[in-house]
Amino acid sequence: MSKVNVAVKYNLPSEVKFCKKCVISNQRPRITFDDEGVCNACRYWEKKDNIINWDEREKKLVELCNKYRRSDGRYDVIVPSSGGKDSVWVAHQLKYKYGMNPLTVTWAPHVYTKVGWENNQLLIKSGLDNVTGTVNGVVHRKLTALCTIEMGEPFQPFIYGQVSYPVQMALAYDVELIMDGENGEAEYGGDAASEEKAGFTVQDADQYWFSGRPLDYWLDKGFTANDLVMYMPPSGEKMKGHTIQRHFFSYYKDWRPQKHYYYAVEKIGFKANPDGRSEGTYSKYASLDDKIDPFHHFFSLLKFGYARATGDAAHEVREGLIDREEAVALVGRYDAEFPSKNFQLFLDYCNFTEDQFWEICDKWRNENLWHKKDGKWYLNQQVE
């Protein structure tokens, strides 16, 4: 299995630096640091706290809702939703605060966790309609395995569906507005040019989330168009006469993940991780629904030198919930934790042997960031 030069593929800096305010490194794709050593995500949060007029942004949200609101009982907005805390906040507010009639659209996880399924059902029981797309299991497992091998990203099939399936449902229900959650490029660090975008386009999806592997790529890898139909965005022909808009709720409302958790607990009885925290982090309320999700974060650790605890700690520093010293300690304790709980499930799902799994890991391990000593791999540098 040929080695991938991850640094070249993702255009990563050769010298590793960590943000002076949070704990993210410059190995996150597309993130930038200023002359003071502060990442653009932290600077964006400063704008959120001091520059952005959220009252004016909310007025724009009301105007948007007024433009698309219907009075005939039909759905007027699609909310992509896993039943997680963030999409609960978006869908619940749109319905009960802004008077919209949302349809929540779920692209099913690879393998539901018990708590993830329960939260999905709590969302529905709170008064929100839902449709769930569950793709052919044979295709999904095969695509997950190939994406792990070829992209170092077992979560890529979920990303394809998460992007495309809401558009399919918007067409099916004649809805012209899709309200996504957050602009990750702005909130967590990425292309600074996207910070002022109210939503995203097909081109944005190709640039930010498909890593050079649009769905057409897989047609030469043993898949047919029929295999991939649920992952595909509607054709140009089907889109004629439609002007579907995708907007970020985070553009209009100040995005605070921990507040969303407390909101979801209050409004729908949202349940946290019954184990007290998720593997690879200290958090108990994020990314709860998919047993495969921890391997997305593990491959991020291999490629970029950071994983789930770094992401959680970085945004909690920006929110003012913890200080940097505590964040550094949390990252040091949890970030490199291997997701052993569902390791055999992941191997079985992808039809990998354990030897094949570690071979794939070696393929995608960024050796600019790692060194091997006495048969074990260690990060060259950790945040401090």
Image (tube, rainbow, N blue to C red):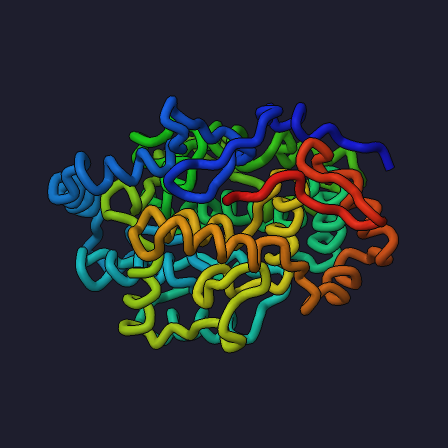
Q: Residue at x 37, y 53 (%)?
A: 316
Residue 67 visible, this orientation? no
Place of residue 194 in the rendered image (x, y in percent of width and height, measured from the top left): 37, 29
Residue 196 lies left or right of residue 302; in this view the side is: left
Give the quadrant of residue 73: bottom left
Place of residue 222 in the rendered image (x, y in percent of width and height, measured from the top left): 80, 40
Residue 80 visible, this orientation? yes
Q: Is residue 369 above or below residue 336?
A: above
Q: Residue at x 70, y 47 (%)?
A: 227
Place of residue 140 in the rendered image (x, y in percent of width and height, measured from the top left): 69, 53
Q: Residue at x 26, y 38 (%)?
A: 46
Give the quadrant of residue 189: top left
Give the quadrant of residue 352: bottom right
Residue 231 lies left or right of residue 35; in this view the side is: right
Residue 179 lies left or right of residue 67; in this view the side is: right
Look at the image and tell me in which quarter the N terminus lies: top right
Of 357 and 40, nearer the camera is: 40
Place of residue 74 in the rendered image (x, y in percent of width and height, measured from the top left): 29, 57
Q: Residue at x 59, y 64 (%)?
A: 279
Of 249 and 33, nearer the camera is: 33
